Image: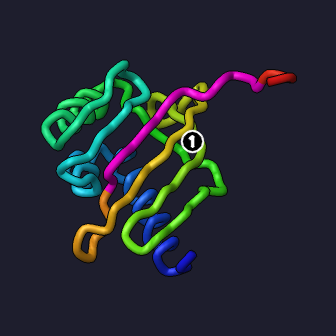
Amino acid sequence: MDIALGAAVEEGIRRWVHSFNHADLEGLLSLYSEQAVLVPTTQGKPLTGTAQLRGYFDRVMSRRPRLHVCLHEPLVVRVQTDWALCSGCCDFAEGEAPAAWLPARFSFCWRLEGDVWRILDHHSSWAPAAAPACA
């Protein structure tokens, strides 16, 4: 893996978290490709394209108290020449001083568009409360 490309993708994830936590809708949407697909945590069907993503994130960011996300480390990043996969775990909570965090997991597929990495596919789902002893 090219370390510089991996760092660029990890920075993109951190920009996603910052934009989400600060309700920066335009900043968040700028990270997505126009053809992006989102399988959201709080909705049962995939969303495609900027207009559907805008509607979804606008509703999520308008909630009160507002949702916040916190990444877990490490992120798993695999980078090729013009695409990258990033997977990891995070927690969601409501409000500035949350009483409880809800565990979730995510994966992003990034594509290099010109000289900018953009999210082409994003999946997010709630994580199991506890892993089974025997899977």
**Secondary structure of the magenta portion, mostly?**
strand
Q: Residue at x 61, y 28 (%)?
A: 127
What color scheme is it?
rainbow
Q: Residue at x 23, y 45 (%)?
A: 25
Q: Residue extending furthest top?
A: 44
Q: In this view, does 96 lie above or below 24?
A: above
Q: Is residue 45 magenta?
A: no
Q: In which quarter of the image is residue 117?
A: bottom left
Q: Residue under label 1, please give it.
A: 90
Residue 41 location (% of width, % of height): 43, 28
Which of these two is toward me, 135 or 132?
A: 135
Label 1 crowd (10 A; few <14 / some 14-19 / many >=20):
some
Q: Is residue 111 above or below residue 71?
A: below
Judged left or right of residue 1, residue 53 is left
- Span shown in magenta: 119-131
Q: Which residue is drawn at 79% across and 24% down?
A: 135
